[in-house]
Amino acid sequence: MRSAFAIPLLAASIGLALPAAAQTGVFRSASVEKGKVVRLAVVTALKKDCSKGEVGSVRVITAPKNGQLAVRSATLKTPASFRCPNAETAAQQLFYQSKPSFTGADEVSYETKTPDGTTETFTVKITVTDKPDAKPKGGLLEL
């Protein structure tokens, strides 16, 4: 009987290295107003060379304790400042919203996979406030 472990075990036993999946970890912070919906992530169908592939994906690893997440599909047009300017593309987006009366710290972790196959894991530390910051801080995505 063959198993999914046969090739890796055979390769390890004779000293061959198997290619590892490209994966990185990114830490961000965001300051948001309580009860407001904010976009944390956007994964498009655009490859590094700006050709279109399958739309990437978003997978929640750790849900927030004091809010909720929603993954939504959309068609977006990239801004002129994007690496692939003014391109219309399918996308997966991740949105966060705190509980209506909650203020304080929250945290989410999620994984994105691009059309090129690159996987990244993100952890976002969220500060939920009564009022929005006069100057938005990094962490929220503007596409």
Image (cartoon, rainbow, N blue to C red):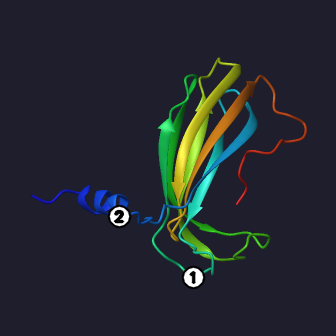
Q: Nearer the viewer, residue 130 or 27?
A: 27
Where disc 1 sits, the SS reads: loop
Q: Position of residue 7 (x, y in %)?
A: 28, 63
Q: Position of residue 26 (x, y in %)?
A: 67, 47
Disc 1 residue type (three-letter): Ser
How far is the residue under mark 2 from the one under mark 1? 39 Å
Q: Position of residue 30 (x, y in %)?
A: 74, 37
Left or right, 88 with reference to 30: left
Which residue appears at 57% of the width and 27% of the height? 67
Q: Quadrant of residue 129?
A: top right
Quadrant that contains the N terminus: bottom left
Left or right, 41 with reference to 129: left
Which residue appears at 62% of the width and 75% of the height? 48
Task: Spot the residue most to the right.
Answer: 134
* Residue under numbered circle 1: 51
Q: Quadrant of residue 98?
A: top right
Task: Spot the residue most to the left.
Answer: 1
Where disc 2 sits, the SS reads: loop
Disc 2 residue type (three-letter): Ile
